[in-house]
Image: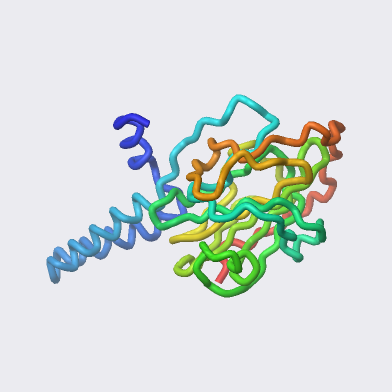
């Protein structure tokens, strides 16, 4: 990435979830100018940090429809066999799980790893352990999405809160169709995103590799997967996703 592209990424418009924080920092800065100048600098520094943290750059998808892309920016901390969250109720056998840890310096917008229908959204309260630890997938507060692909396969994408991340925002509804790389939520201030791949999908990444959400290819769709399209979800009743979980 050249210097121009790096600057464009850092200076990209913020996600709307950051507006209250950015506005709060600016308000504190203005107040500081009136009562105490050091407070103004603190408010300004906080606003600038939030502009950086909540940045939401556009991404370029790979020119293939049969691949899974990273659902988040960050570092791959584990690739292992694990059972998807029980609250989704779709699979009791272990699947390949790729876990991505997001530091406070990473883009925190979550993206659909592949095109499909959101079949179920399930929120699970929990702890706020270090999101880089393996047990964070089971013990931490999380929000899980079950997606049904065009070939009938199902995958799970899980937003996991971290040590200082206390807000998981999911912006999609059950029954909604997502395109590959489409934004579906954000986790505030450090977190983790797990992707459970369907049987037969082999990861093309390694532990320690850095991901670019919506761009990095994580795995290929199994060639043996069924090709028949699935029927659309018939339930038109809106379902409020678990946004801003306490």
Name the residue at the bottom extreme: 127
Report x, y in % for residue 139: 62, 72
Q: Nearer the viewer, residue 131 or 18?
A: 131
Foreground residue among 49 and 217: 217
Residue beneath the point at 62% across and 43% down? 112
Quadrant location, the N terminus: top left
Left or right of 33? Residue 181 is right
Asked which quadrant contains residue 50, the reply is: bottom left
Whether residue 220 appears in this view of the structure is yes
Name the quarter where the C terminus is drawn: bottom right
Q: Is residue 126 left or right of residue 95?
A: left
- Residue 244's x, y, as percent? 55, 64
Which of these two is toward me, 128 or 97?
Answer: 97
Up/down of 7 relative to 55, above or below? above
Q: Looking at the image, is 68 positioned above or below residue 125?
A: above
Residue 144 percent coordinates (x, y): 67, 58
Place of residue 41 in the rendered image (x, y in percent of width and height, measured from the top left)? 18, 61
Name the residue: 14% across, 63% down.
33
Residue drawn at 42 percent across, 50 percent down: 106
Judged left or right of residue 124, residue 3 is left
Q: In this rendering, does residue 173 appear at all?
A: no
**In this rendering, position of residue 227 left or right of residue 239:** right
Can you name the residue that lies furthest to the top here? 63
Give whichever of 151, 211 is nearer the camera.
Answer: 211
Residue at 62% over, 52% down: 79
């Amino acid at each position: 990435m050249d210097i121009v592209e790096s600057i464009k990424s850092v200076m990209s418009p913020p996600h709307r979830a950051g507006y209250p924080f950015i506005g709060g920092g600016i308000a504190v800065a203005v107040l500081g100018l009136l009562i105490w100048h050091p407070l103004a600098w603190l408010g300004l520094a906080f606003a600038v940090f939030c502009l950086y943290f909540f940045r939401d750059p556009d991404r370029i998808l790979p020119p293939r429809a049969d691949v899974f892309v990273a659902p988040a920016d960050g570092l791959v901390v584990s690739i292992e066999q694990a059972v998807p969250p029980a609250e989704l109720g779709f699979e009791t056998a272990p699947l390949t799980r790729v876990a991505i840890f997001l530091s406070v310096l990473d883009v925190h917008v979550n993206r659909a790893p592949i095109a499909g229908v959101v079949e179920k959204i399930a929120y699970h309260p929990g702890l706020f352990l270090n999101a880089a630890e393996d047990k964070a997938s089971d013990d931490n507060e999380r929000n899980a999405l079950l997606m049904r692909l065009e070939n009938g396969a199902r995958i799970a994408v899980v937003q996991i809160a971290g040590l200082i991340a206390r807000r998981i925002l999911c912006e999609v509804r059950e029954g909604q169709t997502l395109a590959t790389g489409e934004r579906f939520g954000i986790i505030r201030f450090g977190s983790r995103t797990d992707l459970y791949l369907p049987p037969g999908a082999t990861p093309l990444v390694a532990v320690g590799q850095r991901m670019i959400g919506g761009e990095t290819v994580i795995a290929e769709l199994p060639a043996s997967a069924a090709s028949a399209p699935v029927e659309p979800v018939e339930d038109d009743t809106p379902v409020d996703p678990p946004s801003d979980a306490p």
